[in-house]
Image (cartoon, helix red, strand yellow):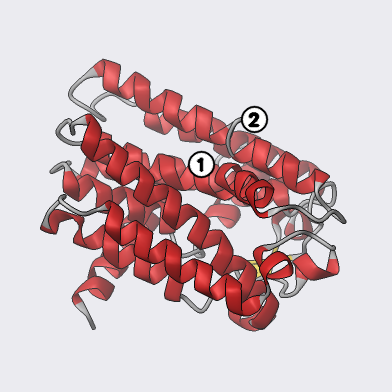
Amino acid sequence: MSDFQAWMTERQGRVELALSNALSAANIAPMRLHDAMRYAVLDGGKRVRPLLAFASGELTGADISRVEQAAIAVEMIHAYSLVHDDMPAMDNDVLRRGKPTVHVEFDEATALLVGDALQSRAFEVLSQPGLTSDASTQVQMLGILAAASGSHGMAGGQAIDLESVGKTLELPELEFMHILKTGALIRASVTLGALCGKPMDEVAMNKIDHYAKCVGLAFQVVDDVLDSEASTATLGKTAGKDAAQNKPTYVSLLGLARARELAEELRTDAHAALAGLGSDSTRLKQLADYIVLRKY
């Protein structure tokens, strides 16, 4: 097992345990809701956002237990967004992470409440004492996650996505949608991880933010490529869904070959953004490679 693979596996296991501990047990009332929350969050996913938080935390010498709290807060927001995105009023999907979506396994009302409760729990986790040495930094972190989740971030991107079905978008319009829908939470992950440690100067923070913008877009480009060519069994979610719903994607706009080239260009830009940050940026570089070269 490579050094990076070992690092990633250890961090994914750490996140899984921390998420399990942070979520109420399924035998605590209201039991159906708590059971559904655990179903939505645990035993699935690549944990890319937590991994990015851990990697950026290494740049600032952050205590891993502090980064862990920021990482699971971001992952709860991500999980809530997937639960809501899969519902009939949104993408109406029946498969997520290789198992039935929450509204299928439970019901629509429970799925709605799962998303609501996970969002609240994320901010509860991020507000716990001891996350940082400086209270004003912790307040800043709460604001970053809120902005990344709201109408100028993830939720806004999803709104644009819904409005764009059946339309042909220009590349800048498509990029704007995904900077919000996918990129905002990925950028927040990188920033929050870094803020758990020693302060970085503005130049360094701008470098890692540009890196995060590149990998956020690359993540979506690769998602579009995989949606067009990978199987449902490989993806753990319904393949070909974007084309079936006539959604604008990087593949529909650029074609498969050019979309692959764009992902590679974004990976190169992400690496370049980290220039001058030293060997502590190695994990961030490796994660850019992982995001672009993944098969699911």
Answer with left or right where residue 194 lies relative to residue 108.
left
For mark 2, does the 10 Å Cα neighbourhood hold few (<14), some (14 to 19), or many (20 or more) residues?
Answer: some
- Residue nearest the viewer, comparing 18 with 28: 18
Q: Is residue 31 left or right of residue 21?
A: right
Image coordinates of residue 51 in percent, x first then y, are: 34, 56
The answer to whether one can see residue 238 in this image is yes
Residue at the (74%, 40%) spot, across then down: 159
**Residue type at tag 1:** Ala
Please state if 31 lies on the left or on the right of 202 as rendered: right
Q: Secondary structure at mark 2?
A: loop
Name the foreground residue: 63 vs 245: 245
The kind of residue on which mark 2 rests is Ser
Q: Is residue 272 above or below residue 32?
A: below
Q: Nearer the viewer, residue 93 or 42?
A: 93
Residue drawn 72% across and 53% down?
A: 170
Quarter of the image for residue 201 reads top left
Q: Is residue 31 above or below residue 43?
A: above
- For mark 1, give the secondary structure: helix
Residue 151 circle label? 2
The residue identified by callout 1 is 184
Whether residue 18 is visible: no
Residue 4's quadrant in the figure? Answer: bottom left
Q: Which mark is residue 229?
A: none
The image quadrant where one finds the N terminus is: bottom left
